[in-house]
Amino acid sequence: MISRSECQARDERDPLAPLRHQFYLPEGLSYLDGNSLGALPVAVSECLRTTLEREWGSDLIGSWNAHDWIGLPERLGNMIAPLIGAASGQVIVADSVSVNLFKLLSAGLNLKPGRTTVLSTTDNFPTDLYMAQGLAEMLGDQRCVLQTVGRAELVDGINETTAIVLLTHVDFRSGRMFDMSELTRAAQQRGALVLWDLSHSVGAVPLTLDADRVDMAVGCGYKYLNGGPGAPAFLYLAERHHTQARQPLAGWMGHADPFAFSPDYTQAPAMQGFSTGTPPVLAYRALEAALAVWGSVSIQQVRRKSVELAELFVALVDETSTLDELELRSPRHAADRGSHVAFAHPSGYSIMQALIDRKVVGDFREPDLLRYGFAPLYVRYVDVWDAVAVLRDVIETRIYEAPRYSVRGAVT
Ligand SMILES: *Cc1c(COP(=O)(O)O)cnc(C)c1O
């Protein structure tokens, strides 16, 4: 049996342990949902106060130049680039993941004239499929068709009609991770482009986009990057596509010279051309302050701890006989997973509500999944131990059967 004091000892040895003090986390809470909404970095509230009082409050509109608000999309893109293995100048922070998918799907179709299919997996994150469906409806099936297949049929599904293979690197349900290098090569050998969604990967898993010769990618700012609720997202486009790629959301911030106020659109070169409207400065400042932590920590260290936390969680569930009713729905082998694990239980929703009531926060995904994310910057080994102890308690006592735990909120 793994004891709580062993977990405490691991926390004491953990080189990342001091980073936890850089986050606000309520006392007594095991927060295992940083894969959905990262915790609040202390630096973010300090930075926002300065942005409000000094920049917006005192310097007003002059801040666009004086505090380089206008440069935020590219500056933050270049802060994210090393986290995904990209040289600078290929990432920009803009809009949401969904909107960025639209821009890149459209750009990718134009880069592959004569090919019309966006190929994805049936289990992809719904917004990825919805954005492709919306684009297909707008362009018509002469220009764009979405085709979805099971994971096992993916490689065989890539053919001479495939323009873009659209995949999420770490599956939001199971945590299963695709081999990015291998699939990118398979798609490109068959003449297609790849568009990777890194929402559940960035900040948790080492990524090597340039080395893997990825064409396009998008990712989320509010999960492992801790940029705050609804934080702006990012998009990546390999430099070799910069001169040809065109995106359809031709807003003035993507214009080569926005303050010329020309009546005609000319897309700005490189990544600036993938901006659309005015950046929401407060949200960018929050993300910028949250990204500062990566100056003092390597993604390899983070990955090592993420694997250990998840392995600990699975081992504790395994050794607890009353938790036999839980069925692991994530790969057993850590190398095949991102930074979360999922277990199935027919009363998953009620169990998660009872856990949250007892200060163990994970989340529930339809139809029956209990999902636990491990954000190594602030999750401790004892948090994992406590979470499984409470889980055992909730299941043994069947307290989750109380009617109040089956009441559904709008967000699960
Ligand atoms: C969280 C997440 C998103 C979020 O998309 P938004 O448009 O930014 O809300 C997209 N894709 C995946 C795979 C996600 O996990």
Image (tube, rainbow, N blue to C red):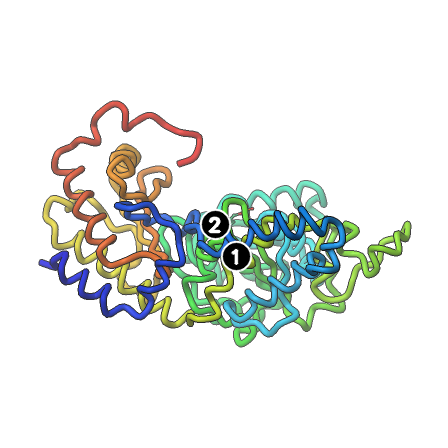
Question: Is 72 in front, or is 341?
Answer: 72
Badge 2 residue CB within 8 Å of ligand 1: yes
Question: Is 10 in front, or is 46?
Answer: 46
User: Which quadrant is the N terminus positioned in?
Assistant: bottom left
Question: Is 130 in front, or is 42?
Answer: 42
Extreme-top residue of the structure: 403
Question: Where is 297 relative to 92, above or below?
Answer: below
User: Horizontal and vertical percent for residue 91?
Assistant: 62, 64
Tell me, for residue 358, which label it has, or none: none
Disc 2 to disc 1, C-alpha distance: 10 Å
Extreme-bottom residue of the structure: 211
User: Horizontal and vertical percent for residue 256?
Assistant: 81, 61
- The residue that disc 1 covers is 197
**Residue 351 sits in quarter:** top left
Tell me, for residue 124, which label it has, or none: 2
Badge 1 residue CB within 8 Å of ligand 1: yes
Report the residue at 44% width, 54% height from top. Answer: 42
Closer to the chain start, of discs 2 and 1, is 2
Report the residue at 48% width, 63% height from top. Answer: 155
Left or right: where does residue 342 sit relative to residue 389?
Answer: right
> SS for tag 1?
strand
User: Horizontal and vertical percent for residue 208?
Assistant: 50, 72
Dots 2, 1 in contact, CB < 8 A: yes
